[in-house]
Image (tube, rainbow, N blue to C red):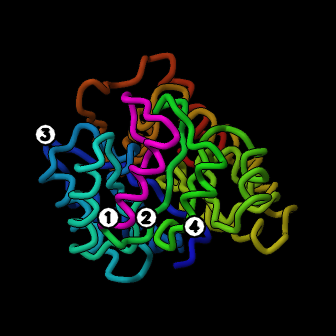
Amino acid sequence: MEFRGVYTALITPFRNGAVDYDALTALVEKQIAGKVAGVVPVGTTGESPTVSPEEHLKIIEAVVKCAAGRCQVIAGTGANSTEEAVYLTNEAKAIGADATLQVTPYYNKPTQEGLYRHFSTVADKCQLPVVLYNIPGRCGVPINVDTIVRLVSNPMIQAVKEAGGSVDRVSEILEQVDTAVLCGDDSLTVPMISVGAQGVISVASNLVPGELSAMVNAALTGDFAAALALHRKYYRIFKDLFIETNPIPIKAAMAMVGQCTEEYRLPLCEMAPANREKLAAALKSCGIL
């Protein structure tokens, strides 16, 4: 399976405490109109830790049904329990997801051998293409490059989402193994593509999928002048979408432009007023609001 282009880490809209499936399907349609390569339902941007198992699978099902083969669907089915990750991934495969995003198990801080066995077990038991998700700032432990090299020898482990904040990691990975690397930080997308990444799993593309697609496609075809112009235009929003814990700012921004209600599940809550003002100013400066 090819992983190349923009993949939107979808928010999960809520309304009155329940998942707002109308807003969710409208968001998927917006992504397809923006020519993204794929969407990622129920990743951590989709508040996967606070949806129920039933909601988790129903969200994937709604996104797969709406996408209807018009873009790839990479289901967020990772967990800090290998058994749970296998269960969710097998269910997502039965629903019709094209691949799975597997976040590094969080809190329990496994060793590199534990990580290897965890991801290998998911790949072997589910037989669905796996995108590894390295985000040590949230999970407490990185997937070391030598562990990635071991893992991608498994034909079902086909890509890495790199969200460690280091462009150098892309070079380190690609120096040792031929696999698809997807950027996990909007502000580093163009730099990472310049050294070999194949695209981005983006938060900002919830808001501006067409613009992110244009930026990434320009970079992938070597037109870095055009890519840099778009990077500079949207850089402020790339940064300010992380002024508080993701996905709080992106949900606030989506509510500001009328695409969802601003509703979270505890322990996430609304933004501080000063940060909300800063985010609104960034949206205006980028021409979004």
Going from N to C along the chain, the mark reached first, 3 or 4, is: 3
Q: Residues within 10 Å of mark 4 (few under 14, many from 20)?
A: few
Q: Give the range drawn in magenta.
A: 102-125
Going from N to C along the chain, the mark reached first, 1 or 2, is: 1
Q: What residue type is labelled 1?
A: Ala
Residue 255 spot, x, y in % from top left? 37, 42
Q: What residue type is labelled 2?
A: Val
Q: Which amino acid does label 3 sit on?
A: Asn
Residue 276 spot, x, y in % from top left? 47, 25
Q: Which amino acid does label 4 sit on?
A: Ser
Nearer mark to the viewer, of 1 and 2: 2
Viewer-proximal residue among 27 and 168: 168
Nearer mark to the viewer, of 1 and 4: 4
Reading the image, the residue beneath label 2 is 39
Give residue 16's mark: 3
The residue located at (42%, 66%) in the rendering is 30
Going from N to C along the chain, the mark reached first, 2 or 4, is: 2
The residue located at (54%, 56%) in the rendering is 201
Horizontal arrangement in the rendering, residue 233 relative to residue 77 (left or right): right
Relative to 34, does residue 289 appear above or below in the rendering? above
The residue located at (37%, 83%) in the rendering is 69
Measure the alpha-carbon separation of dots 2 and 3. Answer: 25 Å
Residue 10, by quadrant, is bottom left
Measure the alpha-carbon separation of dots 3 and 4. Answer: 46 Å
Q: Residues within 10 Å of mark 1 (few under 14, many from 20)?
A: some
Give residue 26's mark: 1
Q: Residues within 10 Å of mark 3 (few under 14, many from 20)?
A: few
Give residue 153's mark: 4
